[in-house]
C-alpha cells in the first residue's frame, strides 16, 4: 500500500512538472495595441447591449489590436463632460445628442419632418452617401470628432388628454408642453395657428406631474417614453405625427481616428456598420412591442395618421423659412455657395417620396 502511495505521489509530481514546463513555453496573450474607453451618458439597456457587441466586434475584426471598454449609465460623467473629453482626446469614443450648443451642425437633425419612419432613417443615414450622414459627419468633423454611426429610438408624436389629432383643427384650444427646441416649437405654433393653441415650456423631468395635474393638455412624446416613462398613465390619446425624429451619434476623437492605420479603420468601420444595422432593427422591434403594450390599455387610444394626413400637417408647418432661420448660417459657412439650405430639404423630400412609393407598391 505504501509503495502504491509513493508511486501516485511521484506520478503527480511529474504531471505538475510537465504542466509547468508547458505553461512556461506557451506565449502570453498579446496586449492590445490600442485600449479605448466608450462612454454612454444615459441608461438605455437596448442600445447598451448593441454597444457592447460593437466593442466585441472591433476586437475581433482588429485581431485583438483594439480593445474597447464600455462604460454605460453615465459612469464617466454627464453628456457634456463626455463630449468635451472626446474633443480633447482623454475619451476615445462616446454617444452624443446633436445639441447645437456643442455641435453647431446639430441644427440640421433637430429640424422637424426630416424623417418620419425607419425606412427613411436608413436612407438618410446610409454610409457613405446618405444626406444626413454626410452632413453630420462634417458637423462632428469641425468639433474634433469622427462620426462612426447614427442610432435612434424613433419618432415623436403628440399625446394629449382632449382628442386625437389628425388635422390642424384638432389643435383647437389646446395647451401643449414644449422644450427649448426652437424647430419643434415653431412647427407646433404653425400647425396650430389661429386655433387657440398655447405652448408651455416645462422641463422633461416635470412633465409627468404637469400632465397629471392638468397644467398642460399634452406634449410631444414617443412610444418608448409612453411606456418606460409612464406617459400613458397621464395621457388619453396619442397620434403618430412622427414630426420629430430622435437621433444620437457614436463618435470618436478625430485625431485618434486620423492616426489609425487603414486596416484598423476598416475594422472599426465594419463593426460600426453592423452595429448600426442591428440597432435599427432592435429599436424598430422594440417600438412594435411598446405599441402592443399600449393597445392593451382600455383608457388609451392610438391614432394612426394616413400619409396624406401627415403630409397636410407637414405642409401647415411651413418649414421652408425655418431652414433658413435655424440652419442657414451654419450651412452657408460650412458649404459656401452650395445652397444647402435648399439641397438638404430637397434630398429629404426625395427620400420621403421614395419610401411612400415603395409602401404603396406593397
Image (cartoon, rainbow, N blue to C red):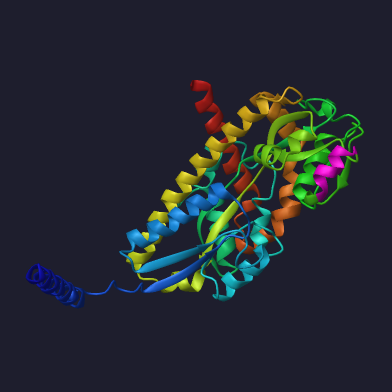
The image shows residue 355, relative to residue 129, as above or below, that is above
Q: Residue placed at 50% from the left, 46% from the top? A: 279
Residue 58 lies, with reference to residue 323, above or below; the image says: below
Give coordinates of residue 119: x percent, y percent.
53, 36
Prevailing secondary structure of the magenta residues: helix
- In the image, 101 versus 152, the foreground residue is 152
Instruction: Say which residue appears at 68% left-offset and 37% top-offset.
Output: 227
Residue 120, percent across and down?
55, 38
- Determine if the magenta segment contains residue 67: no
Please give the name of the residue rendered at 38% of the width and 56% of the height, measured from the top-left corner: 57
Q: Is residue 191 left or right of residue 255?
A: right
* Front position in the image: 275 or 184: 275
- Identify the residue at the far front of this view: 1
Residue range (magenta): 206-214
Position in image of residue 243 (x %, y %) = 69, 38
Residue 151 appears in the figure: no
Magenta-drawn stretch contains 210: yes
Residue 194 appears at what percent x and percent y?
Answer: 90, 33
Q: Is residue 145 above or below residue 338?
A: below
For the N terminus, the quadrant is bottom left
Direction from residue 324 to residue 169 in the image, left or right: right
Residue 144 in view of the camera: yes
92 horizontally vs 261: left or right = right
Examine the image and state in which quarter residue 15 appears: bottom left
Amino acid at each position: 500500500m505504501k509503495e502504491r502511495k509513493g508511486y501516485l505521489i511521484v506520478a503527480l509530481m511529474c504531471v505538475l512538472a510537465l504542466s509547468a514546463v508547458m505553461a512556461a513555453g506557451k506565449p502570453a496573450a498579446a496586449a492590445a495595441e490600442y485600449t479605448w474607453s466608450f462612454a454612454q451618458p444615459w441608461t438605455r439597456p437596448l442600445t447598451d447591449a448593441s454597444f457592447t457587441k460593437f466593442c466585441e466586434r472591433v476586437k475581433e475584426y482588429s485581431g485583438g489590436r483594439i480593445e474597447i471598454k464600455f462604460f454605460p449609465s453615465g459612469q464617466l460623467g454627464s453628456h457634456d463632460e463626455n463630449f468635451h473629453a472626446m474633443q480633447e482626446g482623454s475619451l476615445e469614443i462616446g454617444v452624443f445628442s446633436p445639441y447645437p450648443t456643442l455641435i453647431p451642425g446639430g441644427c440640421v437633425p433637430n429640424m422637424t419632418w426630416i424623417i418620419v419612419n425607419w425606412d427613411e432613417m436608413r436612407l438618410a443615414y446610409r454610409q457613405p452617401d446618405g444626406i444626413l450622414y454626410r452632413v453630420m459627419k462634417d458637423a462632428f468633423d469641425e468639433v474634433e470628432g469622427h462620426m462612426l454611426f447614427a442610432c435612434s429610438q424613433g419618432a415623436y408624436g403628440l399625446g394629449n388628454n382632449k382628442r386625437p389629432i389628425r388635422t390642424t383643427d384638432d389643435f383647437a384650444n389646446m395647451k401643449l408642453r414644449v422644450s427649448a427646441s426652437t424647430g419643434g416649437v415653431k412647427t407646433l405654433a404653425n400647425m396650430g395657428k389661429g386655433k387657440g393653441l398655447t405652448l408651455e415650456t416645462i422641463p422633461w423631468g416635470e412633465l409627468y406631474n404637469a400632465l397629471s395635474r392638468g397644467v398642460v393638455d399634452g406634449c410631444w412624446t414617443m412610444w418608448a417614453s409612453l411606456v418606460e416613462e409612464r406617459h400613458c398613465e397621464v395621457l388619453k390619446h396619442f397620434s403618430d405625427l412622427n414630426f420629430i425624429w430622435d437621433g444620437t451619434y457614436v463618435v470618436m476623437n478625430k485625431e485618434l481616428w486620423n492616426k489609425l492605420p487603414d486596416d484598423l479603420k476598416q475594422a472599426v468601420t465594419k463593426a460600426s456598420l453592423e452595429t448600426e444595422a442591428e440597432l435599427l432593427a432592435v429599436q424598430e422591434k422594440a417600438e412594435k412591442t411598446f405599441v402592443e403594450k399600449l393597445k392593451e390599455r382600455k383608457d388609451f387610444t392610438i391614432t394612426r395618421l394616413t400619409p396624406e394626413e401627415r403630409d397636410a400637417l407637414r405642409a401647415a408647418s411651413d418649414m421652408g423659412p425655418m431652414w433658413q432661420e435655424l440652419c442657414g448660417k451654419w450651412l452657408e459657412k460650412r458649404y459656401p455657395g452650395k445652397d444647402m439650405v435648399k439641397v438638404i430639404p430637397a434630398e429629404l423630400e426625395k427620400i420621403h417620396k421614395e419610401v411612400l412609393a415603395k409602401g404603396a407598391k406593397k
